[in-house]
Amino acid sequence: MTLPPVPASLRAAYDPERFRADGHRLVDLLAERLAAATGRDEAPVLPWVDPAASLADWPGDFAEDGDGDLVGVLERAAAGSIRLHHPRYLGHQVPPPLPGAALADLVAALLNNGMAVYEMGPTATPMELAVVGWMARQLGFPSSGSEDGSGVSAAGVLTSGGSLGNLTALLAARQARAGFDAWTDGDHGGPPLAVLCTAQAHYSVSRAIRVMGWGDGGAAVVEVDDRWRMRPDAIAGAIARAEAAGRRVIAVIASAGSTGTGAFDPLDAIADVCAERGLWLHVDGAHGASAALSPRHRHLLAGIERADSVTWDAHKLMAMPALITAVIFRDARRSYEPFAQEASYLYASGRGEGGAEWFNLGLRTLECTKRMMSIIVYAALEAYGTRLFRDYVERCFELGAELARRIDAAPDFELAASPQCNIVCWRWRPAGGPADDAGLDALQAAVRRRVIERGRYYVLQTRLGGRTVLRAALMNPLIEEIDLDGLLDEIRTCGAAEFRS
């Protein structure tokens, strides 16, 4: 049987000249969009469309033969998307990605090298090891053996998001501190386990605990202080409550830049307690670990070098496109323990004990065909240098402090928490408005809805101390005073409209 010729549709789809033409057109389109957003055009930050109407705008009845206008589809998608590069975006902890990093992401997508084994990622693997090693050094982790001769050095991997990063760290903590081989014998090999965290811990912690089968009792809550930081003196009480419920506590999860308020837990004092009690210390630094890049803010992380594991999102305060999370272990040997199984078609030495296949990163992560995300971070660090990232962190933190100052000085606003970074929470309390918490809660939600539907600004709301508050994460370093003043005016405008309705 003679092999038939390659179909014309496939030839056309892989045509380099078609790719070149579409690429030039697409980059021009995106550059225009970037210029409009950074130039503060009057188009909405969020072009609000009702979800049902949006679904109708994107039908799934695809034709057998397309119209060939790939860029047209992408242009329409961009037009309806929220604009993170606009200085009036103050919403989730998602940055306006560096345009150069987006170009590196394009290269990663086209090369499409998987990252489970070195031979499928012969450049991305050393890039990943270099990036993770650099991040570990910024945290103060050992890089080539400790001074006491123990030979301890740090290691880790990049993975797709803080949720996977936290799960990976907790699996390592379980294997290291459970007192039995949970990977082989399951959680029935010993008593029920638990970790300690505050109510401010990211929801991915709760998810990870449930994925591991620990249920509701798997997280024992530690009280916080008046700045929403974990109280080290309350850890003993949380352990006692967990043990009374029949749980063995194996770890403490501290926050470095919590999602709700941006709070940094007192890591040094928490590390003291963990050392005394033999507990694993994991620091969820998804948002705030980037403070290590700033001499001005490095003190917020004092003690992080004593953690057993840290998660750090490059797609937050390093301005990388999502998702790129580093999960870093102070002791490299622990990086092999979360996923210790045999896969002989991939790995010759099975569990990779002792780092025998250190170059096969799939031994240390849940993902097998992992995107070559390391090329994005490595290229950005090489091209821009580390100063850019220091400047980015410091600018965003300055913006958080400046917004807080403006809120504190305005008689119709009140800060809900004193910010430690670029996350700010507050309430609008207009003269003549509701005096009770329930009424104020409803007012914040109603005003935020009007802000979103108008589309000139994008902010969030959350619950803090049982109250509804407005919340901003200032992720765009191009925000200026005019944008901060405009935000408060926009809230007043939307609030006045709410009172008239």
Image (tube, grey):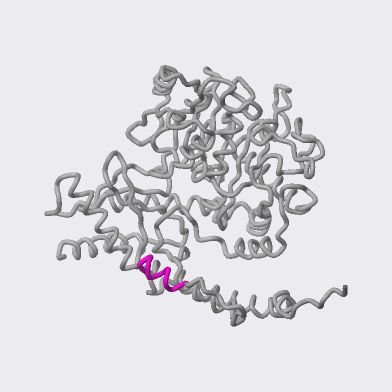
Residue 5 x %, y %: 81, 78
Left or right, residue 1 beside residue 209: right
Q: Kindly indicate the quadrant of the structure image that contains residue 229.
A: top left
Q: Residue furthest left?
A: 432
Q: Residue furthest front?
A: 1
Left or right, residue 347 beside residue 94: right
What residue lies at 31% left-to-right and 64% top-to-bottom?
486
Q: Residue furthest bottom?
A: 67
> Is 345 situated above or below 147?
below
> Is 60 situated above or below 416?
below
Q: Which residues are magenta?
A: 49-58
What residue lies at 40% left-to-right and 48% top-to-bottom?
423
Residue 181 x %, y %: 64, 24
Q: Is residue 184 magenta?
A: no
> Is 86 situated above or below 320?
below
Q: Toward the viewer: 431 or 465? A: 465
Q: Toward the viewer: 307 or 452? A: 452
> Is 183 situated above or below 390?
above
